[in-house]
Amino acid sequence: MDAVRHQQTDLSHRLYDPPGQNVLPWQCVWSTAANISPALRSSLSGHRRSIHHLAVGTVDGEPVVATAGPDESTRLFHAATGTLLHTWNDHTGGVTALVFHSRHDQADVIAADAAGRLHRWDARTGRPRALVDAHRGPVTGLRVLSHADHLWALSTGWDGTVRWTDLDEHHTRLLLDSSLGGLPGLLAISAPSNQPPMGLIAIGRHPAEPGYVVALDLPDGQARYRLSFPTNLTGLECADGDALPTAVATTADGTGRIWDVTSGQMLHDFNNNGRPGDLEVLHLTSVDTPEGPYHLAVTGAHDGRIRLWDLDTARLLHRMDGHHMTVLDLNTVHDPYLEHRDGSPELGESVTDQNDLRLLTRAAADHHGSQQRNALAGLIVLSASADETVRSWRALDGKEVRTYTGHAAPVRRVAAFQPAANSDRLWAVSCSDDATGRVWDLADRTGHVTGAAHPGRIDALATATLHGQTLTATTCRDHRLRLLNTRTGSLLSARISGDSPVHAITLGATRQGPVCATASPDKGIVVRLTETGAVLWQHETEVPVVVLQAGGSMRQPVLLALDDHGRTRMWELATGRPRTGPLSRQEGVSAIATGRIRDTPVAVTGHPTGELLLWNLSSGALRRTLCPVDSSAPGIQAVAFADGPSGPRIASQHTRLNHHSIRVTDADTGRVCSITDLDTDDDRATAATVFGLGSVQETAVVAAGGPGNAVSLWDADTGDSHAVLWLPDTIHGLAFDGSLLIVAYGRELALFTPAALRDALAEKDTRRGTEKQTRLAHRRSSKRSLLQTTLLTLLLEWEGHNVTSLTSLLCRHIPSNAVRAAVRTLVRDGMILPTSKDALGYALEPKGRALARPVRPAKTAAGTIPPLKLRGWHGQPCSLCAHRKVR
């Protein structure tokens, strides 16, 4: 599968057909890979649930990374290779904090869990070194400190206490008991070399309530001062230096404060005009420069913006825009190669772009500028976001260096490390809610593998062969309707479908050409031509539509819809006129599907009572009851229809408490062919299971997939297993087009076929591609028709015409079908393109603009006559018709 994703065709063939072994029955033909970063070096797997915490360190000079989350386990990996070194399952609750600490030749992993315990393990041997019951309830925050030859832990808990724990002697003491209840887990330790350590604790949980910071002397716990804030805190960090140790806090109202850790005296405020959510994440870093240490703060916002601050002046240095969702973590790392390039004394080498020159000009007028440039040169900011990406930024100018994609859920943490001892290369590791960790090479600049890119999870999927074209339509959170060639995976178009997510999608055939129907809350039902994107009709619905199915014949294509209240409605697919009949007003329906029994279009409805009905789609009349209400069948969640070699088959998904099965029924006789029981241990997995029904040469095939990252295929008539397809991410949708199985996993698509059809499909595609190139070359060499030239002329005078307005500007003897055909030809040949502003219309492409020739107005004694809007086949004003009009 990965070989196909990275376009290693020869390797995938060798893996699918290993020497001396049987060929795998189902094989992947292609897969999109636009969301895979070539900088990915390895993956950290094994966790059963999301990973919320990670910590990096070294053991015997080798980089390691510890990961943990709510699955009650902590794992240690070799960071460069992804090899699992140790697994610790000693927790009695989810892990809530994780720290890696090195002292002398000892390396330790310290974790806190929801049971209030602190665990310490030897990172080299994996043996436990300490287990301390510190809190009555979950630990919310943890920091460790090496002090007086002992390893100490400062922790906060949901029980409202702050504790100081000796991890060598295995005892703990209470420092503070808050009367306000659970503590949010924001704490920091200040330990300058010439002063005793201090702990800073944030108190306050609700954003609307005031927050506090209490400073405690360590280890006696004596409170030194208390600072008040207008709202609770979102970040708290300390910056220790040889001079004045400072602390920084950010609050829920979007403002920040800098103060002296020792005395509590305020030094600066920053972002005073901020909005709530501007400063959600805080990270501090200190850079050594010839002028002394230079302190910086990096903050992340709810809207995805990142800001870089100078702590000495509280001045905003850069704002970094790129993430489109909440920033969840920030980190910094020093890149020596970048510093050499940015800090070269020669202006021609150091100033790489106009922003650098602007920064140097500003710095020359500021005595602080030299130190600032020395500190920012070579500094990289790493960010993790809920938009499922990791990004790197240059601190010098705030420019994005690279986006790292590969996670399929929000990214919780990111950190940098060196993959080998004494190496100048830098890698990063991240963890996500997709239960994986990813390792990235920060120096990799390889371009992305091409393919259709979905920025989010694929929400809706449909595939069909229409007018000789194999098409697949998808939608995701960016509200774009993408159309792909099913056989090749190439992207044909990507158009905005509205301002809200699409809940249902289907493909159908009309006399005008293939169409795609979508249902969304803001637009209702919209039917578009797939070739041009032109809207044939639109119907607003009071109740959201959850399922759409297209069927019928070429003469009478029908659109069947099921809304969220279980009601069905029918329309003519080409015109949008409502259809009558019992099927168009059914209630209490939970699933619908369409198909054909021989030459008769039919529809199937499933009901929560387990009833399965077969309908005549053209008339809307009931054909027969396949499964009555009084049967033992559980409620139906979904249905699918396919015409297999042994006859038409209907697959229905049945669910109830402790029951999950898929039944296959003969649509002709109503006989139950097979019943396959699925896993019922996880109710969420049962609800998320998707399935489809297709046909191969020998029999009909059922496919089912879900959160388990696997698609199971079995014989529809006998229930015998065919194969299990393992994919890299959660299965969100699948659909059959005959023997072609298209699967949506995470943000990617993949096509699977039986092994015997894979080579034949590739040869057929090659032959079709050659024929298509020949036809396109012939079409390009042919001249434009007079009608096409006239349409280009009209669009040159005013862009935005649609088919209706273009037809109205022409002679009435020109049929609208001819106009539509001419428009499709112009779109196909790249002369015009669909555009949508107030209403869908067409605009000239540069190629079409070069061919369009404006009509010169005629001159008379009275002056110049405006050009006529009504035109004939010849492209000139139609003077022979009595209904001529002037503009």
Image (cartoon, rainbow, N blue to C red):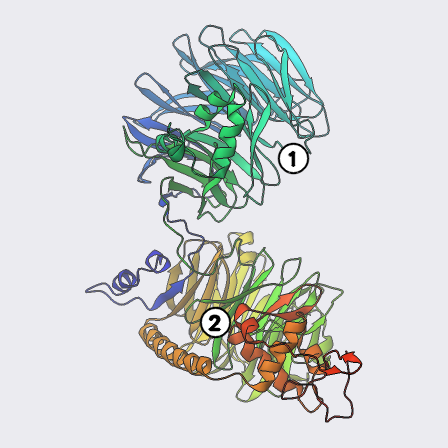
Name the secondary structure under disc 2: strand
Name the outermost residue toward the left: 20
Q: Is residue 624 visible?
A: no
Vertically, is 396 above or below 499? above
Between 869 and 513, the one lying in front of the other is 869
- The answer for how far apart the CA atoms under marks 1 and 2 are is 45 Å
Name the residue type under label 2.
Phe
**Which mark is first along the chain, 2 or 1?**
1
Q: Is residue 130 above or below residue 534?
A: above
Which mark lies nearer to you, 1 or 2?
1
SS at circle 1: loop
Q: Which residue lies under the disc numbered 2?
A: 736
Image x and y of residue 127, in percent: 33, 26
The residue under the point 54% across, 68% down is: 846
Residue 43: quadrant of the picture: top left
- Left or right of 833 in this view: 877: right
Mark 2: few, some, or many residues within 10 Å (few <14, many ≥20)?
Answer: many
Residue named by callout 1: 277
Residue 246 in view, yes or no: yes
Query: Which quadrant of the figure contains the C terminus?
Result: bottom right
Q: Amino acid at mark 1?
A: Gly
511, 796: nearer the viewer: 796
Image location (x, y in percent) of residue 742: 46, 67
Relative depth, front residue between 338 and 725:
338
Q: Is residue 820 above or below residue 312?
A: below
Q: Position of residue 743 (x, y in %)?
A: 46, 63
